[in-house]
Image (cartoon, rainbow, N blue to C red):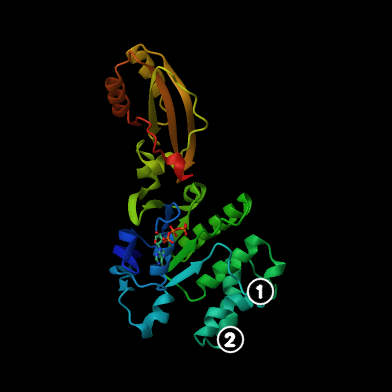
């Protein structure tokens, strides 16, 4: 379990203060995968550096399984760092070392006996589906295999938390899915706590149990995928269920409707049309499985004469969530 409380990081450039993290609080239980989405400059790298103790937070705390990370002294810092395994975008393997040599590296650095290292390397490569690849060099491996080695190396020190920084951004879609499935499987099997920094909503959909939107150093939105997908005004929900090209609807009142598992299969729109004796114009829509459950989003147009407040109330009473689409939509997060 990782608990981040009121984390602040202020950089100073001469007289100027740059607030990179502005009170980030977040809790992820053991065995869960949490995604962090954010635009460039939101504070993602700073958060990674604070969690890996490459940077000291200005204030706030990071606790891993009840142990406070941010207050450890310089002497214990190496030990504390071992609690967080790091997976990078480009695997960052040492080209001069074999796959086995790369996985062995962090164990060698802390003086683990040779026999124990050999046993760990074989076990870890087996765990990531690379049994028998001990002697292959990174140049002889595919991008996905290199990332598997990177994951095995991150697990070598038996960490509690796996911190994955854009782990699939350099991979093709098929390999991305394989690596994400591996991360999910390892999370459950080893009871890890996983944080994935990503800009890809597909990563969130496939592997995350919960997600946060980091904006200007603050958590602007967060929740489980189910909680988020039930709120039509949530930008994360809109990014999870982006609408295909939306048709213009001159002279109509446009509404976005989010349907959750319970309502996605009920004929809400036809009953709406019957109830109010109106025509409902479907402008765009999508229905997708998110976090193992079906969610839907529809954009509809109503003729201006319709009593919109009554329509919204009717839809909400039917279990849907309704929003008026604005200019700042979740599509921009894609
Ligand atoms: N060492 C530093 N000194 C001064 N300002 C910094 C430093 N590191 C980051 N910042 C500033 O802190 C803010 C957050 O930066 P950060 O690199 O954490 O964002 P990010 O979300 O990782 O962006 P990107 O996706 O582009 O890497 C930015 O305004 C950045 O300019």
Image quarter of the N terminus: bottom left
Q: Name the residue under label 2.
A: 115
Name the residue located 38 percent from the left edge and 44 percent from the top edge: 226
Q: Residue furthest top?
A: 277
Name the residue located 32 percent from the left edge and 73 percent from the top edge: 70
Name the residue located 61 percent from the left edge and 55 percent from the top edge: 171
Q: In this view, does 148 lie above or below 328?
A: below
Mark 1 or mark 2, whichever is nearer to me: 1
Query: Residue 177 — which label?
Result: none
Q: Which residue lies furthest to the front in this view?
A: 15
Q: Could you say which quadrant of the image residue 270 lies in?
A: top left
Q: Report whether 203 appears left or right of 226.
A: right
Q: Which of 318 and 170 is in front in this view?
A: 170
Q: Quadrant of ligand 1?
A: bottom left
Name the residue located 55 percent from the left edge and 67 percent from the top edge: 151
The answer to whether residue 240 is seen in the rendering is no
How far from the left and from the top, in percent, is residue 95?
66, 74
How far separated are the C-alphas under marks 1 and 2? 24 Å
> What SS does tag 1 mark?
loop
Q: Name the residue under label 1.
A: 95
How many C-alpha atoms fall within 10 Å of the one at disc 2: few (<14), some, or many (≥20)? few
Q: Which residue lies furthest to the right in this view?
A: 140
How far from the left and from the top, in percent, is residue 68?
30, 73
Q: In this view, does 9 lie above or below 237?
A: below
Q: Which of 226 and 3 is in front in this view?
A: 3
Total marks shown come to 2
């Amino acid at each position: 379990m990782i608990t981040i409380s009121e984390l602040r990081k202020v950089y100073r450039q001469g007289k100027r203060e740059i607030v990179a993290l502005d009170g980030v609080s977040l809790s992820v239980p053991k065995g869960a995968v949490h995604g962090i989405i954010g635009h460039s400059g939101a504070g993602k790298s700073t958060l990674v550096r604070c969690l890996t103790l490459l940077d000291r937070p200005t204030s706030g705390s990071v606790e891993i399984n009840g142990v406070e990370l941010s207050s450890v002294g310089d002497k214990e810092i190496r030990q504390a760092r071992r609690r967080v395994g790091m997976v990078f975008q480009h695997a960052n393997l040492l080209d001069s070392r074999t796959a086995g040599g790369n996985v062995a590296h962090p164990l060698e650095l802390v003086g683990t006996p040779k026999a124990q290292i050999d046993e760990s390397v074989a076990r870890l490569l087996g765990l990531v589906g690379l049994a028998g690849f001990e002697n292959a060099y990174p140049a002889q491996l595919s991008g996905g295999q290199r990332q598997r080695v990177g994951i095995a190396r991150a697990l070598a020190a038996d960490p509690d938390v796996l911190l994955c920084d854009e782990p699939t951004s350099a991979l093709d879609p098929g390999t991305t899915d394989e690596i994400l499935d591996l991360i999910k499987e390892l999370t459950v099997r080893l009871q890890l706590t996983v944080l994935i920094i990503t800009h890809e909503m597909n990563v969130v959909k496939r592997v995350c149990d919960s997600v946060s939107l980091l904006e200007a150093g603050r958590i602007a939105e967060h929740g489980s995928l189910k909680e988020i997908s039930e709120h039509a005004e949530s930008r994360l929900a809109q990014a999870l269920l982006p609408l295909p090209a939306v048709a213009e609807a001159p002279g109509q009142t446009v509404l976005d409707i989010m349907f959750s598992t319970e309502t996605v299969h009920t004929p809400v729109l036809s009953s709406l049309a019957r109830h109010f004796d109106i025509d409902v114009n479907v402008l765009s829509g999508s229905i997708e499985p998110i976090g193992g459950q079906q969610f839907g989003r529809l954009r509809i147009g109503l003729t201006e004469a319709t009593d919109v407040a009554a329509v919204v109330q009717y839809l909400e009473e039917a279990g849907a969530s309704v929003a008026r689409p604005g200019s700042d939509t979740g599509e921009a997060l894609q």
